[in-house]
Amino acid sequence: MDQKNGNFLSAIFLCMIVLLGWQYFVVEPKLAAERARQAELQKLQGGADGFELRKDADVVAPDANGLGVGTLNAQQGVASIDKEFADSPRLSIQTPELSGSIALMGARFDDIELNNFPTSLAENAPSIRLLEHATLEDNNTWQASYGWNSADGNPNNMPNSTTLWTIESGTILTPESPVTLKYEAPNGLIFRQHISVDAHYMFTVKQSVENTSETAFTLFPFGRITRLGAVPDAPIFVLHEGGIGVFGAEHGSEEISYGDLREDPAFDMTTTGGWLGLTDKYWATALIPPQDEVFRGRLTGKQSAKGDAYNALYSLAPKQLVSGGQIETTGRLFAGAKQVKLIDNYNDQDILKFDLMIDWGWFYFLTKPMFKLLALFYDIFGNYGVSILIVTILIKLVFFPLANKSYVTMAKMKKLQPEMMRIRDVYADDKMQQQQEMMKLYREEKLNPLAGCLPILIQIPVFFSIYKVLFVTIDMRHQPFFGWIKDLSAPDPTSLFNLFGVIPWDPPQLLMIGIWPIIMGLTMFIQMQMNPPAPDPIQRRVFQLMPIMFTFLLASFPAGLVIYWAWNNFLSLLQQGVIMSRHGASIELLPNLGFGKNKKSEGDDAGSGTQSG
């Protein structure tokens, strides 16, 4: 039966290898080719006039489709509009962390570069371009704008995305020099946007309307973020990319992925206090209405043959504008990197729950403190890799009592092995009686054979919190360790299968088994070999394969996480060795590695094979 079980386990393992190989070498290339083909089709079929926002009089912008192309459908018409936009004047933006411009046609924020974040680690790599206007060659765009709409739904004489604004004051938008844009409508309304920016990523837009006519108007202000083009879904479930927002103090964050926005009806809520926007892994844009006014917010998506459209929109209650009067409102726009300290600082500046812009996950009560602890040591040592090593030691100290109890239990069980072997021999044909006698022995000696599993189970949330911090926080992006690790948030770039770069060959992703994953696998293997071999052949085979499986599994994880696991294993080795030696229990490392023989009594240890985290 044991041999059959061993063969069965081997068959399962081989099937897993075949399935993984088929997935990586056959299925994934085909999917990638199909995605590329669909993207190319969208480029060929799509134009700047192919996207229409949901027509909703009290939320959307006054023009029919929100992109300033009117009802043009012919490619020639699209080209003329695009050329008109390209030739229109722009207002330059210069801050320590941002550069770009605002299009005076439509008063659109559609040209924002993040100065401190290059696209890659390559020398002279360009900066990340967050907001961008679509061209005929590339219909992807991400932009924001503010404006007014008429309560009667009539867009005539309202500024829209083809309106050409003038600069009334200021020349360049900087933290020290705000600017004012102006538009005089034919109906006697004078619109102004007073725009200021801080030293980071927050714009403040104060809108005002002056009525020089004899007619009264009812207007409502709105803010809008629009993103067009193919946006891939988040590659892993722990990461949120898509619509996000907070709608009222009694609610948490609403998170709707790009995929759900394409398929589900729009999210719509009216509340007081909050914000909404669109987010990627590291970057986001968000509209912040006045926190003391009621606003209606919507997160929408639309899928069509010409491409996808995503929108975050809000509108305030209608405002009465009498003849000779003036009305105004102030909103804020965040467009930048989701840096933890900066986001927390904005959260403290009366923006309701703005810290939820960063997706800390279910274990936020562990994840965010974990980041703060890592950041604390980073401020001291200037290296997040060193911070990980130090925090791992602190975690080991916190869990030391539990781990100590686990190892003490394992040491005591080893001393009981002769009695355990006698029970198995006496009741070899009566498994039920054998188990009863074993449980009786455990009770008499006050032992829990499952105690070794507790450190692993309890540390799972800690492991996940470190993984979440490394994966979602931009503070870890492009952070080096030592040697070949230039980015702790990316996998180890080396591979055993090209001799770590000696052979000029780029292995497929499945074979990218770097140095740190191998170190992690070796430490895990050595830790398991410190225990006697498991009595059950299937269990013994599983423990033998586990380090190999984890090596392949973690090879694609962020290098910082693999370093944490390897360092944690090494500390556990030292801890286990010291505790077992103090209790007189023999360490089976050398015999299990073939440099000696196991004691006969230790060959059938029922509690073996369990490792501590």
Image: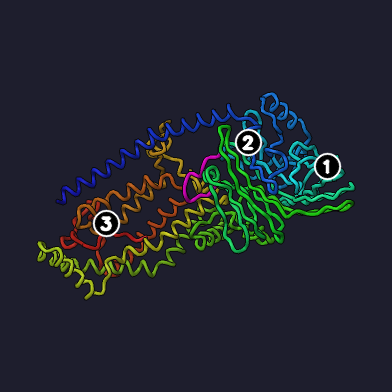
What amino acid is at disc 3?
Leu
Task: Please state the horizontal and vertical placement of residue 337, each as a whole percent of the image.
Answer: 62, 48
Crowd class of label 2 (few under 14; some 14 to 19; many from 20; radius 10 Å): many
Q: In the rendered structure, which disc, 3 or 2, sits on the residue that comes first in sequence? A: 2
Q: CA separation, marks 1 and 2? A: 26 Å
| Label 1 close to label 2 by CB (< 8 Å) | no
- Number of numbered discs on residues: 3
Task: Please state the horizontal and vertical placement of residue 272, each as a whole percent of the image.
Answer: 67, 60
Q: Is residue 326 above or below residue 167?
A: below
Q: In the rendered structure, which disc, 3 or 1, sits on the residue that comes first in sequence? A: 1
Q: CA separation, marks 3 and 2? A: 66 Å
Q: Is residue 75 visible?
A: yes
Determine which residue is flagged by label 2.
51
Residue furthest front as drawn: 152
Determine which residue is flagged by label 1.
183
Q: Is residue 176 visible?
A: no
- Frontmost of labels 3 and 1 is 1
Give the number of the disc on residue 295: none
The rendered magenta stretch, by its main secondary structure, is classed as: loop
* Viewport quadrant of the C terminus: bottom left
What amino acid is at disc 1?
Tyr
Between residue 171 and residue 237, name the one nearer to us: 237
| Label 3 close to label 1 by CB (< 8 Å) | no
What amino acid is at disc 2?
Phe
Determine which residue is flagged by label 3.
589
Give the magenta part as a residue range. Answer: 231-242
Q: CA separation, marks 3 and 1? A: 80 Å
